[in-house]
Every structure is written in C-alpha cells, then in structure tokens.
Image (cartoon, rainbow, N blue to C red):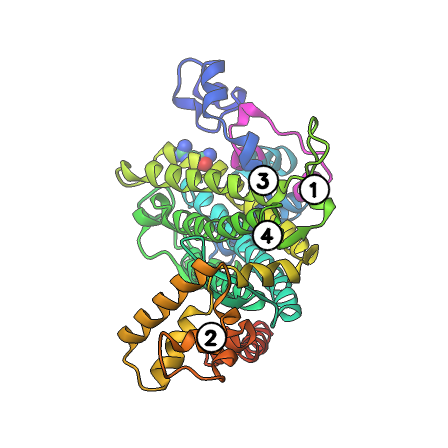
Amino acid sequence: MQKNSLNKKAESWSGRFSEPVAELVKKYTASVGFDQRLAQFDIAGSLAHAQMLGAQGIITQQDVAAIESGLNEILSEIQSGKFEWLLDLEDVHLNIEKRLTDKIGDAGKRLHTGRSRNDQVATDVRLWLRATSDDMLAGINKLQISILDLAEQHADTIMPGFTHLQVAQPVTFGHHLMAYFEMLKRDAERFVDCRKRINKLPLGAAALAGTSYAIDRGLVAKSLGFDGVCENSLDAVSDRDFAIEFTAASAILMTHLSRFSEELILWSSPRFAFIDIADRFCTGSSIMPQKKNPDVPELVRGKTGRVYGHLMGLLTLMKGQPLAYNKDNQEDKEPLFDTADTLLITLEIYADMLCGISVNKANMRQAALEGFATATDLADYLVKKGLPFRDAHEVVALAVKHAVKKGCDLADLPVQELQQFSKLITDDVYQVLTLEGSVASRNHIGGTAPAQVKQAIVRARNFLN
Ligand code: ARG
C-alpha cells in the first residue's frame, strides 16, 4: 500500500497524504510558472551538490556520473524549449528532479540526499541574484558612459541652476549631468556591497537544522563561486534580507532615474525648450497633431512606483515570519524578477536615450539670464572688496529691486547706477556679472567651472576603467 502510493503519485512528498491535493490548491501553491526561470541555477547547484556527495563517499561516483549527464541533458532540453513543465510537480526543483529520475532511475532519487528544497531554493535565488547584480552593474556602467559623453560635449554650456525650481545661479549643463554620474556611482557601490552578502552558500542547511551526512559545505561553496557559507542553518533557509537589499538598491537607483526623468520632461517641454529628445523615444498624440510626448522618461518615472511597491512587498513578506522556512518565501521571486527586469531595460533604454538628446544652448543661456542668476556673484565681488557678506547681500537685494523695476538684468545696469548702491562697484564688476565669469569663478573641486567639469569627467573615466 505504502509502496504503491509512492510509485503512483506525482508529488515527492505524497506518501503521507490520504487524498490528493485539490486542483485549486495545486494552482495556488505552485511556483513553476515563474520559478522555472531559476532552472539554470538549480541545475548548477545540483551538480555541485552531487559532486560533493560523491567526493564524500555519500553516493557512488557512478551515481554522480549519471546525475551529471542527466542534468546536462535536462539543461539542453530547457534551453531549447523542449522541456515540459508540469504544474502537478509544483516548482522548478521537483520538475527537474522528476525528469532526472525518469532518465536515470535510482541515481536521480539519490540527488536529494542531505538537501531540502528549502536550502536549494535559497541557493538558486542567490545564484540568480548574483548574476543579476553583475548585469545591473554592467547596465549602470553603460549609462554612466552615456552621461560622460553628453557631459563632455556640454562642459561649458551654460544653463540656469535651480533651487525651488527658480533660477538660482548659472551652472554648466555638463556639471548638472555629472550630478547624475555621482548618484549612479553610489548606486553601483550599493550593488557591489549587497553582492557580498548575496554571495554566501545556504546549501547544507537542509530543511532547517543541517544534515547528519558528512557533507563538505566548503567544497560546494567553492565550486559554485560563493565567498563562503551561511553560518547558521536556520538563517540560511529563512532570511531573504539580501533580496530586500537588492530591491532597496534598485529602488534608490530608480529614484535617481525618476528625478532625471522629471528634468528631461521639463526641459523638453515647450515652456523650457532646453533639450530635444530624439523622435524614436517619443510618441505622438492620437488627437493633438502638434504633440510629441516624452513617453520614455514618463514611464521611467512611473515604473519607479512599481519598484518601490516590490520593496514594500518584500519587507512585508518577511516581517511576520517565525524561523525558519515558511512558504511565504515563495512570494519573493516575482517581485525580485520584476525589479530586475524593470531596472535592466530601464538602464539600457536610458543610455540610448541620452545619446539622442540635442541641446538648445541659446534657450538655456537665455533662461540663465532671466532670473538675476549672478546676484550672488555681485555679493561675493563686494565681499572681496571688503564689505561684510550680510551688507553685500543687502546692497545686491536693492540693486535687484531696481533692475526689476527697470525690467532689465543686473549686467544691463550702467556702472553709475550700480554705484548708487555701493561705491565699491567699479568697471570690473561686469566680469562677475556675466554668466561665463560666474561659472568660471567656481573653480574648485565639485564646482561648476568648465575646467572643473572637464577634470571631473577625466576622473570619472579613469574610475570606470
Ligand atoms: N517553491 C518553494 C519556494 O520557492 C521551494 C521550497 C519549498 N519548500 C517547502 N518546504 N515547501 O520557496
């Protein structure tokens, strides 16, 4: 009876059960629809596990050889799309194991010795996430190069810098772009750092407590390229903090791209008309023929919300779980996969889109002239001539008020008029009142002077190499 049920039923755990799982429950609990994406990593993990079992004399070398050739065949079946995934077999792990057993018989049944799906799935996710972190870093790198290329062309293109979305001080467009380079540099650091914690081996934890077989976890770690093993079995199978961290790093990266997008949208609007985004990244309106909509940056901004949602989802998934493994953790995969898919395509399209941006320098310059952007420079000029900063601030405020009344810029006021506000003002004032003089004077590391922007780009290129 017992033997019979073992042979007949599809589920690997079904001997204990007296009725089959309800169809709806099967559908509800199965993960094979999405976790088949882990197949390649599941097989890599199984190969390393089997080789270790063989090396430790837990299974025979003959079994190891059969497992290896069986798993390699299965991998090609999966890669060529010939593999038949069965919902009845619940998840990627049981699908592959069943196929292996169909192919090689008892040796296939020995593969799961000293292992559980709990440490198996944790290993698969970590392997997948490690590879994905590397893809993410490559994507960031490519976008950074696009930023540097654009910044280099515009190291001395003047635009207004804003605070409170009001013209504040002139900056160079290259400098503005390099701000995003810095953000992405920190984003990359976050992925590099998070990868260290991803890259630890859970296998050997088995279901939760470890295993009574004389396994060699170090060997498995080494053959899978892990930096070490998870040092507590309960922690190894239950925590997904590394996945949360990855998603948090992704959410922050999306925040940066969302801010950048918001700027591209503003700058490309006819009100600003600072830039033009190439037509291939825009769409038209079905009713208003004059429209050219910046769909790509708008979608980046929109997709940021979805990635934040995944972060919240994963945090919430984890927060109420007692140790050790709970089926809740099966819910980690879809948010993770979608986070990675969203980020990778966003990084790629962003890098392309930046190459398709053209700049209207005249409009940028005109806008910088319109908001008394060099008022601070006049104050600094007076300070350098001996006036205390607070007094200089007041002198300039009065001069600005006067210019507003006249409807002109500070640089348009004749020196005699400027002298009504301070006798310290002389002809040399126009050097600082011009946009070029203003940006060139901010000539220190981190400043907007074209010379500094060029140096920052050189440092950035060296860093990337
Ligand atoms: N599909 C499961 C998951 O993704 C694999 C682990 C199943 N373990 C279990 N005890 N039911 O988490």
- Which span is picked out in magenta? 73-95
Q: Which residue is more in the foreground, 267 or 258?
A: 267
- Work out whether mark 4 precedes mark 3 in sequence or the reverse, and give the earlier one: 3
User: Where is mark 4, residue-wise?
Assistant: 347
Asked whether 189 falls inside the magenta stretch, the response is no
Main SS of the magenta segment?
helix
Could you classify mark 1 by the number of other residues whose Cα lies within 10 Å: few (under 14), some (14-19), or many (20 or more)?
few
Spot occupied by residue 457 in the image (x, y as percentages of width and height): 58, 74
Q: Mark 4 against mark 1, which lies toward the viewer?
A: 4
Measure how far apart labels 4 and 3 are at the Cα level: 21 Å
Q: Amino acid at mark 4?
A: Leu
User: Where is mark 2, residue-wise?
Assistant: 447
- Work out whether mark 2 precedes mark 3 in sequence or the reverse, and give the earlier one: 3
- Work out whether mark 3 precedes mark 1 in sequence or the reverse, and give the earlier one: 3
Q: Mark 2 against mark 3, which lies toward the viewer?
A: 2
Q: Secondary structure at mark 4?
A: helix
Q: Looking at the rendered structure, which numbered label has been put on residue 37?
A: 3
Q: Mark 4 against mark 2, which lies toward the viewer?
A: 2
Q: Are the residues flagged by discs 4 and 3 in contact, CB closer than 8 Å?
A: no
Q: Amino acid at mark 2?
A: Gly
Q: Is residue 162 left or right of residue 283?
A: left
Q: Secondary structure at mark 2?
A: loop
Q: Are the residues flagged by discs 4 and 2 in contact, CB closer than 8 Å?
A: no
Q: Looking at the rendered structure, which numbered label has been put on residue 79?
A: 1
